[in-house]
Image: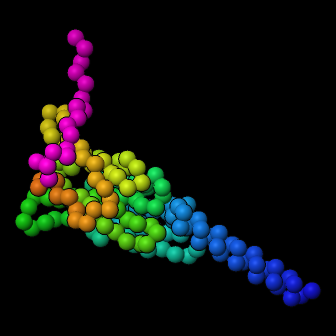
Amino acid sequence: MFFRIVKIFIFFLVVAFFEIVGIFLYRPSLMIDAYRGVDEKSIWIESRYFDFQRKVSDTDQYKFYDLQWSPNGRYFSYYDFVRLEWAEKEWALKVFDARFFSTKIIFIGDDHTGAYDWIDDSTIRVCAGAGSGVRTCRKINIHIQQPIVAVDDYSSGAWTPEKTFHSPNF
């Protein structure tokens, strides 16, 4: 009788383990929280169910205070400050893969770099101010090999202008 209870207990432990692993592989955002640290200068990930915490950010300056999860819950993204010596490019859009705990820079822009949003599980739409209420936007695949540098890429034809203001009706 005792061994039967132990077998049942072990069975439930194995089932629970595989259920947790399955949920993590399917949608990591269900098991991991991404948030700004109490000092507002770092980004952390933390497991909701286990005692696990890890610092994700490289620097202590951010353009926006929101972290955005991808629709499938595998990636989250944020702007981070990077100062390149050879150009006036300052903001890097970073994507963190919560399944493999890796960070990748997909876009580097200047101080005109604006908001971004997830289009689908592997595409982000990045916008930059073009002046006079107009901004240009570009869709970026997060699986690119090298980051797109905005100043070098503006003439590629991939940027589309958008009108961001409405003229008053007179």
Q: Residue furthest left?
A: 86
Q: Position of residue 97 (x, y in %)?
A: 40, 66
Q: Which quadrant is the C terminus positioned in?
A: top left
Segment tinted magenta in the rendering: 153-170
Q: Which quadrant is the N terminus positioned in?
A: bottom right
In the image, residue 17 lies in the stretch drawn in magenta: no
Q: Is residue 164 left or right of residue 9?
A: left
- Splitting the image into 4 quarters, where does residue 167 fall? top left
**Quick check: 32 above or below 128?**
below
Q: Residue at x 37, y 71 (%)?
A: 102
* Residue closer to the observer: 45 or 116: 116
* Residue closer to the observer: 12 or 167: 12
Q: Is residue 58 left or right of residue 8?
A: left
In the image, residue 155 lies in the stretch drawn in magenta: yes
Q: Position of residue 16 (x, y in %)?
A: 69, 72
**Quick check: 44 above or below 159?**
below
Q: Position of residue 2 (x, y in %)?
A: 89, 88
Report the label total. Answer: 0
Q: Residue at x 22, y 65 (%)?
A: 146
**Quick check: 14 above or below 104?**
below
* Residue closer to the observer: 55 or 115: 115
Q: Residue at x 10, y 58 (%)?
A: 88
